[in-house]
Amino acid sequence: MIKIAICGAFGRMGMTIGGIVTKDPEMQLVGGVDVQEGEVFGVPVVSAGKFASFLSESKPDVVIDFTVAAASAQNIPVAAAAGCAIILGTTGLNADQSKNIREAIAKGGVPAVISTNYSIGMNILWLLVREAAQRLSDYDIEVTEAHHRYKKDAPSGTAKTILEILQEEVGPREEVYGREGMTERGNEIGVHVIRGGDIVGDHAVMFTSNFETVTLSHRAYDRGVFAQGAVKATKWIVGKKPAVYGMKDVLGL
Ligand SMILES: NC(=O)C1=CN([C@@H]2O[C@H](COP(=O)(O)OP(=O)(O)OC[C@H]3O[C@@H](n4cnc5c(N)ncnc54)[C@H](OP(=O)(O)O)[C@@H]3O)[C@@H](O)[C@H]2O)C=CC1
Ligand SMILES: O=C(O)C1=N[C@H](C(=O)O)C[C@H](O)C1
């Protein structure tokens, strides 16, 4: 039985993951952390200040974090120091937060999966984007992403991963975030962010020449697709050597 704790237990992703974990006979939800204390799926949710003592009492094998960057920067070092494997899905981390989290994971000697997108489809799209960028390296490239009105970070973590892949293959190119005014397109990658309603997660990469456009796109219909991926990663990480892994390791890509 894999014992799980969720950081961001009352959040959109936390609730979706909690719902899957509680129905899975191989897993046991032991509790969570959130801003508000309380109970979810019959287990306790504590505040960040009580996280360390909660971990030493309930001893989860894996801590799954879908919160906000500042919270992950606070909670992941605590979980790693307690010897828990980590599944990190939170996006919007700055370079320092990312570095500190990775150092804490190394210091704790625990395995972790970090991914900006846990859906299988997006992990395949990333492969396709790399392939297309290699073959269409002189095309103009534009990246668009759309998410629900409550999303805090922009561009999305997934779009940032797409940009990293593009920069590796066709960079360095300037990243131009939206356009306004009187400027011709340069040697750049355009990045466009849409926020509205309950859009679960749309991403597209457009490669354009004078004669044609190739568009690679992904649309998530339900955040269950990310939650299922995070649960797959959770089962995979148990017993792995201490290191930071990606979803490509989980999926064998
Ligand atoms: N990698 C992936 O596949 C995916 C990543 N994400 C990312 O996951 C993150 C969460 O998304 P989502 O669930 O939609 O967001 P929500 O805002 O719905 O959930 C985040 C939860 O974390 C809570 N929280 C805030 N601060 C703390 C803290 N210090 N300790 C514990 N909990 C805290 C929030 O509480 P409160 O609301 O009171 O502030 C909220 O309940 C985002 O960064 C998002 O981009 C989302 C989907 C897929
Ligand atoms: O906040 C979200 O909802 C999502 N966030 C992730 C991101 O920033 O890329 C993944 C997914 O697109 C949903």
Image: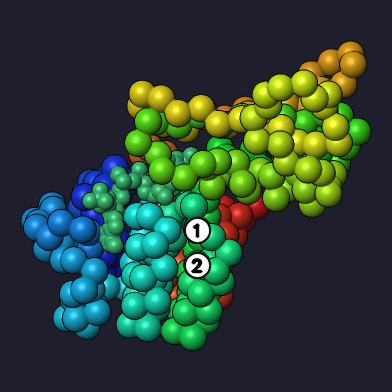
Which residue is pictured at 50% across the width and 67% down the height?
Answer: 97
Quadrant assignment for the N terminus: bottom left
Q: Mark 1 points at which residue?
A: 93
Residue at image location 66% in from the left, 43% down from the top: 162
Q: Which amino acid does label 2 sit on?
A: Gln
Under circle 1, the secondary element is: loop
Q: Position of residue 12 (x, y in %)?
A: 29, 42
* Residue 62 visible in the current orientation: no
Q: Percent x, y for residue 217?
A: 62, 28
> 154 or 228: nearer the eye?
154
Can residue 37 be seen here? The reply is yes
Extreme residue in the top direction: 211
- Label 2 sits on a secondary structure element that is helix
- Residue in the image at 70% along x and 50% along y: 164
Indicate the position of residue 252 as horizontal and vertical percent values.
61, 55
Number of other residues with Cα within 10 Å of mark 1, as a class: few under 14, some 14 to 19, many 20 or more? some
Position of residue 183 measured from the top left corner of the image (x, y, whole percent)? 80, 25
Query: What residue is shown with label 2?
Result: 97
